[in-house]
Image: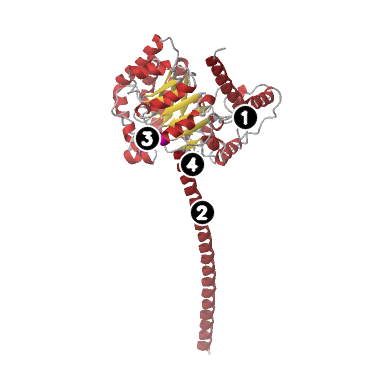
């Protein structure tokens, strides 16, 4: 057998073993995981000059954070990312505009150096996909290309994505389709992402039609996120673009009730996020959205309740879908500031500049998040109430199933097979990154000491304050008694 085939078989074995072990640990509701994440998401940066268009609703800070800069630190981080690639089903790259980042091409080469699997997925505005990039995306191949398109007409698109044009983007998408046809490839899959705004929601049916005509297979719609960054740049953004008026909500609800069933027949999948919150807030039944079942759960194949197997996790009469949000068991998402999340919509559980990824994956914060979610405390775990339907539910403990049969055997087998596999590429961390982590760790330690000192000072201040108040009250009481006594004597003397 050729060496390349042996390497490919070993790589596939590592991937499949990790998927089986992760699946078993999810159904067994483990909080400390021996499996590695099956999905790694990277937000490369948010520098103003690293995105070639201007979206008023962009939620990024645009403060210059960049995972690939400075170059020596970026190279060392790429080495750390590389160690996880054999375990991944998806490496998701996004933001600002990944194709504009120095270092992105090298990151793509890193992927090509360790795997021929369709691992790489990218989110892009589509404006920089020239013929060379289109060919590269098909030849590698990328697993998917997600193009952000926030309008069904050129005019609306131009308002929401300033500096770009819808015909240009669709022409670039056509380049990818041409190379797929030329190389007889099914990949990359073409996905589209639509941010639902007050100014564009009436074009959702046109958007569906346009995406179908241009070869997109998966669609995702998400309500706009208003935060400090975009509201500072666009002070009227919340007033102009959030859907709050009951008449607008009613119109959007009716539109989605009519358009969504047809869209689900046209596309492989239509995911929605945030609309359930919006509709239920205004008293509408949003169950038709299937947001909980078809929400933003990347690489969650085989983890729905009905996949557990007879006699394992699924209870009689239980609805299909996810009994427990799978993201903290499948996903690592790294923001441009180094923050590491177990879901891209939740609070961070660590920072890449302070600790290695493999440590953060099972850090105390990560374990605590999984435990809280198992107990049904989604909000306490750091989930978003706007986009996560489960975060709004009444806490309900997800008890580990009485595992017998296939799932137990699968867990044991996967654990035994995973034992010989170390974390690939793990070893001494290069000095530059070590220095950064040492400094940040020392800063964290000093901050903790300062917090302890401040807390002790606050406690001492509160003790002194209580003592002063007690003495003052006693003094006032004595003075009142003396004044009361004098008043009594004065009245007696007047009577006499």
Helix, strand or loop at disc 3? Answer: loop
Q: Do the residues labelled 4 and 2 touch (CB within 8 Å)?
A: no
Tell me the colour scheme of the image.
secondary structure
- Residue 290: percent from the left, percent from the top? 51, 25
Q: Quadrant of residue 337?
A: top left
* Residue 442 shows in the view: yes
Specify whether 76 is left or right of 394. Answer: left
Q: Which residue is outermost to the bottom?
A: 496
Q: Nearer the viewer, mark 4 or mark 1?
A: 4
Helix, strand or loop at disc 4? Answer: loop
Q: How far apart are marks 2 and 3 (CA)?
A: 32 Å
Q: How far apart are marks 3 and 1 (CA)?
A: 35 Å
Q: Are marks 3 and 1 in contact (CB under 8 Å)?
A: no
Which numbered marker is on residue 354? 4
- Residue 494: percent from the left, percent from the top? 50, 87
Q: Distance between the residues labelled 4 and 2?
A: 17 Å
- Residue 297: percent from the left, percent from the top? 51, 27
Judge the density around disc 1: few (<14), some (14-19), many (≥20) Cα neighbours within 10 Å: many
Which numbered marker is on residue 46? 3
Asked if the magenta segment contains residue 68, the reply would be yes
- Would you name the residue on which mark 2 appears? 449
Name the residue nearer the viewer: 294 or 69.
Answer: 69
Q: How many marks?
A: 4
Name the residue nearer the viewer: 341 or 116.
Answer: 116
Q: How far apart are marks 4 and 3 (CA)?
A: 20 Å
Magenta range: 64-72
Q: Which residue is outermost to the right?
A: 404
Which numbered marker is on residue 25? 1
Q: Nearer the viewer, mark 2 or mark 1?
A: 2
């Amino acid at each position: 057998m050729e060496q390349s085939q042996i390497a490919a078989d070993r790589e596939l074995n590592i991937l499949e073993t990790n998927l089986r072990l992760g699946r078993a640990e999810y159904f067994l509701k483990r909080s400390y995981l021996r499996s590695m994440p099956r999905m790694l998401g990277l937000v490369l940066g948010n520098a103003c000059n690293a995105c070639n268009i201007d979206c008023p609703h962009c939620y990024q800070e645009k403060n210059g954070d960049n995972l690939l800069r400075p170059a020596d630190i970026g190279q060392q981080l790429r080495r750390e990312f590389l160690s996880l690639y054999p375990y991944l089903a998806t490496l998701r790259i996004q933001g600002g505009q990944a194709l504009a980042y120095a270092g992105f091409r090298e990151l793509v080469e890193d992927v090509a150096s360790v795997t021929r699997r369709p691992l790489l997925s990218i989110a892009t505005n589509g404006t920089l996909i020239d013929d060379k990039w289109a060919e590269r995306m098909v030849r590698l191949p990328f697993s998917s290309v997600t193009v952000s398109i926030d309008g069904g007409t050129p005019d609306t698109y131009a308002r929401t994505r300033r500096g770009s044009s819808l015909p240009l983007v669709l022409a670039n998408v056509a380049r990818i389709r041409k190379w797929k046809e030329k190389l007889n490839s099914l990949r990359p899959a073409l996905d589209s992402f639509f941010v639902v705004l007050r100014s564009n929601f009436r074009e959702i049916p046109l958007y569906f039609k346009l995406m179908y005509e241009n070869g997109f297979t998966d669609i995702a719609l998400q309500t706009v996120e208003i935060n400090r960054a975009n509201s500072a740049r666009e002070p009227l953004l919340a007033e102009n673009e959030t859907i709050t008026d009951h008449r607008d909500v009613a119109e959007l609800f009716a539109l989605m009730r009519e358009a969504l069933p047809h869209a689900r027949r046209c596309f492989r999948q239509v995911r929605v996020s945030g609309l359930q919150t919006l509709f239920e807030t205004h008293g509408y039944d949003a169950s038709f959205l299937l947001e909980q079942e078809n929400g933003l759960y990347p690489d969650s194949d085989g983890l729905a309740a009905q996949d557990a197997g007879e006699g394992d996790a699924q209870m009689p009469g239980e609805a299909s879908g996810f009994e427990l949000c799978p993201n903290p068991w499948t996903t690592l998402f790294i923001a441009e500031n180094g923050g590491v999340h177990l879901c891209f919509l939740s609070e961070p559980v660590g920072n890449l500049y302070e600790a290695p990824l493999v440590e953060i994956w099972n850090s105390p914060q990560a374990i605590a998040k999984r435990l809280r979610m198992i107990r049904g405390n989604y909000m306490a775990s750091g989930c978003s109430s706007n986009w996560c339907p489960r975060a709004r539910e009444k806490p309900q403990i997800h008890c580990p199933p009485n595992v017998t049969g296939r799932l137990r055997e699968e867990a044991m087998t996967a654990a035994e097979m995973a034992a010989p596999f170390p974390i690939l590429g793990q070893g001494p961390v290069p000095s530059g990154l070590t220095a950064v982590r040492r400094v940040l760790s020392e800063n964290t330690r000093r901050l903790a000491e300062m917090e302890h000192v401040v807390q002790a000072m606050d406690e001492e201040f509160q003790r002194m304050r209580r003592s002063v108040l007690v003495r003052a009250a006693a003094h006032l009481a004595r003075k009142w008694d003396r004044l009361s006594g004098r008043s009594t004597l004065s009245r007696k003397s007047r009577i006499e």
